Image (spheres, rainbow, N blue to C red):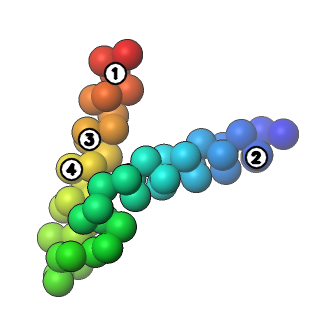
Amino acid sequence: MAIYTLRNRVERCFNKLKNSRRLATRYDKTASSFLGFVDISCIRLWLRYLST
């Protein structure tokens, strides 16, 4: 049961990240700029989580 809970949490996180069009379509040409935007998106999700 615990594995399902963790898997569900990870899948929900990826779905929230894919709401950003730039991540879903991967407009960035280099891996470093793409990963930088992934970091920014994760920080935005984390800040949104902290504010609730």
- Do labels 2 and 4 touch, CB within 8 Å? no
- Which residue is rendered at x = 31% and y = 28% of the image? 48
On screen, residue 23 versus residue 1, left or right, reads: left
Q: Residue at x 84, y 39 (%)?
A: 1
Q: In the rendered image, which residue does mark 3 sit on? A: 43
In-image side of 42 versus 33 (left or right): right
Can residue 51 be seen from the camera position used here?
yes
Q: Mark 3 or mark 2, which has the lower sequence index?
A: 2
Dot 4 corresponds to which residue?
Answer: 40
* Cα distance between the residues tagged 4 and 1: 15 Å
Three-letter code, disc 1? Leu
Badge 4 crowding class, 10 Å Cα cut-off, few under 14, some 14 to 19, many 20 or more, is few
Query: What residue does disc 2 label?
Result: 3
Residue 33 is labelled as none
How far across and down, in percent of the image, does residue 2 sit?
77, 39
Tell me the amino acid under the disc marked 4.
Answer: Ile
**39 or 51: which is nearer to us?**
51
Amino acid type of the residue that numbered disc 3 sits on in the rendered structure: Ile
**Tag 4 secondary structure:** helix
Residue at screen point 71% across, 40% down: 5
- Indicate the position of residue 16 as horizontal and vertical percent values: 43, 48
Q: Secondary structure at mark 1?
A: helix
Instruction: Measure how far apart labels 3 and 1 are at the Cα level.
Output: 10 Å
> Cα distance, mark 1 to mark 2?
24 Å
Classify 49 as above or below 22. Answer: above
Query: Amino acid type of disc 2?
Result: Ile
Marks 4/3 in contact by CB < 8 Å: the verdict is yes
Q: Residue furthest bottom?
A: 29
Residue ID for mark 1: 50
